[in-house]
Amino acid sequence: MSDILGIGITHYPSFLPRVSAPGTLRRILQDPGLPERYRKPEGWPEVMRQEWGDDEGLKFAEQHRRAVVGAMKDSRQVLDAFKPDFVVIWGDDQYENFREDVVPPFCILAYDTVEVRPWSKNDRPNAWGEGKDTVFRINGHRDGAKYLAAKLIEQDFDVAYAYKPLHEALSHAFMNSVLFLDWDRRGLDLPLVPFSVNCYGRRVIAAQGYVESLANPIPEQDLDPPSPSPSRCFDLGAACARSLAASPWRVALVASASWSHAFMTRKNSFLYPDTQADRRLFDALTAGDYDVWRSVSLSEVEDSGQHEMLNWFCLAGAMSELGRKPDRAEFFESNIMNSNKVITTFAP
């Protein structure tokens, strides 16, 4: 019987040496469809105004990043101490590797190795001072990936799998997870099994996985088919835990995503995230009340801009199957930084 470690992380905040409120917020403020009351901080929720302060969020953004990165470093210490044979990362694909040619609900990336150049298309400086030609070589674990795919298919989860990339070597969810877990640049040599979840569903092609215009919303007939439901992700995570618990490997299961995203929360005019919905799930997570998680509907996730949290529903299902509650969980609220963030670990 293998040991399994659970970790939940984010793959944001900004890589910039000096962070500020993201361009997404500034873009929404220029959207002609934004209600006039939101165009100036005076019309924002009180917490958001406090974050904005008198410097357009500079001080808060830096404090926020330090706190999140500190928690990320703690997660890395737990990961190092566990010494897994490989790491499964559930992450979203934001119109990156999967586009018009195919959008699988779930896909296990059974790569031997890939090389990523995170700064090749970005002229802005990054927090590490790395150049455009910087290359990260990421090893996979094909045997573990094939084993997991086979066991899931045997349990009636018709997951896709791939031995090589389609459009991008790795989507941002996986690449950023590696960059953040190796914030101190000590190297992250653990084999990875990226597990792609179609979190953006109806808007993955229609909005190319990003910001939709308030003034010109996408017509209903132009939207895509939906994501897999939260309960399906939850059950898939449980099946992963069962399968890997019977394997010969020590495995870390990682959910990589922030929680509700402002630019996906239409009821808040894409301006700020749904903190109340996030807090409800956070409280249930810390209490180990997984019935709350499994009862969430896809329409609730979409209404609250929690699309990327489908990755976390996979982790919640796995930890429910193993009877685990978090041994550590931190909630980082942020309105101007586009999304709330949670960092958790579930010790074996």
Image: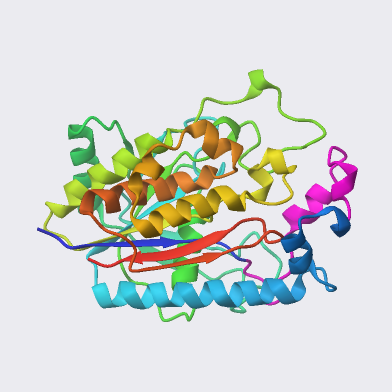
Frontmost residue, 118 versus 70: 70
Give above or below for 232 relative to 290: above
- With 163 as the anchor, is 199 left or right in this view? right
Looking at the rendering, the stretch of residues picked out in magenta corresponds to 14-40
Residue at image x 52%, y 25%?
225
View extreme (top): residue: 221
- Whether residue 99 appears in this view of the structure is no
User: In which quadrant will I find the N terminus?
Assistant: bottom left
- With 137 as the anchor, is 322 left or right in this view? left
Looking at the picture, the colour scheme in use is: rainbow
Q: Position of residue 157 (x, y in %)?
A: 27, 33
The kind of secondary structure the magenta stretch mainly shows is loop
Give above or below for 128 relative to 149: below
Give above or below for 69 relative to 42: below
Q: Position of residue 310 (x, y in %)?
A: 45, 44
- With 312 as the anchor, is 251 left or right in this view? left
Give above or below for 59 relative to 96: below
Q: Position of residue 198 (x, y in %)?
A: 47, 38
Q: How many marks?
A: 0
User: In which quadrant will I find the C terminus?
Assistant: bottom left
Q: Position of residue 35 (x, y in %)?
A: 85, 41
- Whether residue 262 appears in this view of the structure is yes
Residue at image x 35%, y 51%?
315
Residue at image x 58%, y 58%?
340
Q: Can residue 26 be found in the magenta stretch?
A: yes
* Residue 294 picture quarter: top left
- With 40 as the anchor, is 321 left or right in this view? left
Q: Can residue 242 be found in the magenta stretch?
A: no
